[in-house]
Image (cartoon, rainbow, N blue to C red):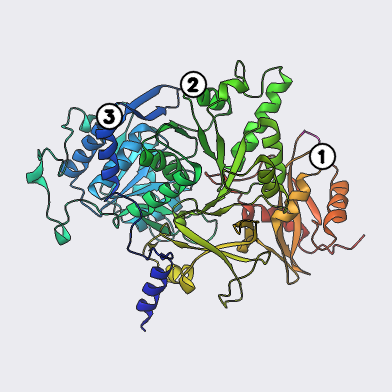
Amino acid sequence: MTAPQSLAAAVRAAHDLPGQPAGTYSVPFRNLRDVLALHAKTSPEKTFLIAYDGAGERVELSYVEFVARVHQVANFLYDDLHLQRGDCVATIGYNDADMVLLYFACWIIGAVVAPQNTAEDDVRLAYILRHSRASVCFVMHDLLARAETIIHGGGGEGETGAPNILGIVQVGGAVRAEYVHLGEMVRNRPTTFLGDESGAKAGDIPLLAGNERTATLEDDALLVYTSGTTGAPKGVRLTQYNLLVDAQGIAGWHAITGNQRLMCVLPMHHVNGIVVTLITPLLVGGSTVLNRQFSVGHFWERVVREKVHIVSVVPTLLQYLLEHAQRLEQQGATIFGSGIHRRNLARFRHFICGAGTLSVQLARAFEDKFGFAIVHGYGLSETTCYSCFLPVTLSWEEHQHWMQAYGYPSIGCPIAPNDMAILATDGSGQALAAGERGEIVVRGHNVMRDYFQRDDATAAAFAGGWFHTGDEGFFEVDAQGRRFFFITGRMKELINRGGVKFSPFEIEEVLLSYPGVRAALAIGFEHDHYGEEIGAYIVPQAETPPDSAALLAYARQRLGFDKAPKVVVTGADIPVTATGKYQRLRLRALFADYRSTPFRRP
């Protein structure tokens, strides 16, 4: 078997499920356009999108209004920009109603969206834009100057900018003569598009490969780039089927129906914001509330006003809400804000939480304070979004058991579109039993197509017919035979002290239990004697930090000398990605002065 055939076989195996081999579909739609058309016909006046801009201005669109505007944008993309099925469209922006319209317009003509994370530096964004091969970039009006720098003068390491970007289209703001303006170009356009049943534009339908006139489930929909802190970003190719089948799995798991409303507070350049709070409510005919950004001051107010049932968050946002509640209590207000009481939240069901490190301490404190369950889950861009969740049918006691009893909050059980396992890390590919630690692997219909233009990375990720996540974990089995998975850390972030590997999560749970510690990370830093030694980076709750010697003694008593931190560094905050993931490697330099220190047992 040739090497390409071997890679193709491994990728195909990673998309298989028992009884549902790769190439079979478990969603009742031909493409994303079918979903839009269904709800526009069956529930035309029902609200789909409510969007708040940065000034708090509110826009509401019914399904029929939303679909009409999507078709207007699609007409512009096809007629004026000459974009075709398979072309890539880049975006530089933030949560905005026009960006939502653009995403769906791209998908109904079969184009691919490559959303950019504006938290990345200009050099990295220029590389991503070049690598994506996008021909046009849609940019929010207040980011145009930065986009010009990135596209025309950015780059680095011998390459500058993104010369493949042939045009910049302005989104929002006052019209500027030097740019094509999305709003001006789509206003007053007809709402029919490519193959509508009316046949109004049938003569304009291009004959594409295989006489396919519209996108299929196998067409690429998203090209999202990994946000790792080392190495070049990798482009994750997700198909329309990936988006729909993962959304179907999320909706089924959480019992999300057409009479429910989700709220988006996470950036929609990431799969969490796109899949959980845009595609999932669309699939079931529900509604979504889009926020420009997360705000503790507006959060509960909008949940109440918009009758929201579920919100998808990351652990960092839970921490912010908890601290805000504590400040409100000190001011004599309710934990939800002035005038908001628990009875006003009768519709609210639970939080979906993943993407970052959720500690037992934070989960316990949050659930005790607010009384709402955190439905913890796990997934990656490479698995479209979520791969597993805690069951929503657990009793409160069972929920607390899986959140607290094992030292890590469980990430739950696999959802319908995929299977999961723990494999040995010695290269044998051996599946491990309950309680044994190894690498978390995933296979199923929500696994990405591949890494764009990176056969080497694709081959490594799909070795043995599973997608290898790079995360260490284990599972335990309940009385019903369900496997509850746990993540213990990124394999690259495990601390290797003298050949013995320690999970940073385990150490952090102890640090977080010490009085006066608001946030804490265990950092493996370079050390002359052990290769790596363990440091504690903490953010104190008050201006006066906890005594370092007492904190270290506390950790040694509970962890033992080898596993306990040897030095404490105090800071004001923890660097995170746009989706709330801790950036541990950025903190290693803070411990450089201790590289040669011979730490002795007391």
> Badge 2: how crowded within 10 Å, few (<14), some, or many (20+)?
few
Contact between labelled residues 1 and 3, with CB atoms less than 8 Å apart? no
Query: Does dot 2 land on a helix, a strand or a loop?
Result: helix
Name the amino acid, label 2. Answer: Arg
N-term mark: 3 or 1: 3
Q: Nearer the viewer, residue 446 or 313?
A: 446
**Label 1: which residue?**
515
Please say whether residue 162 is visible from this viewpoint: no
> Badge 1: how crowded within 10 Å, few (<14), some, or many (20+)?
few
Please say whether residue 426 is visible from this viewpoint: yes
Contact between labelled residues 2 and 1, with CB atoms less than 8 Å apart? no
362 lies above or below 347: below
Q: Is residue 422 left or right of residue 202?
A: right
Q: Residue at x 37, y 66 (%)?
A: 21
Name the amino acid, label 3. Answer: Pro
Q: Which mark is residue 305?
A: 2
State how far apart marks 1 and 2 are (Cα): 37 Å
In this picture, which residue range is highlighted in magenta? 542-546
The N terminus lies in quadrant: bottom left
Residue 294 placement (x, y as % from top left):
53, 33
> Which SS type dominates the magenta stretch?
loop
Q: Residue furthest right?
A: 602
**Label 3: which residue?**
44
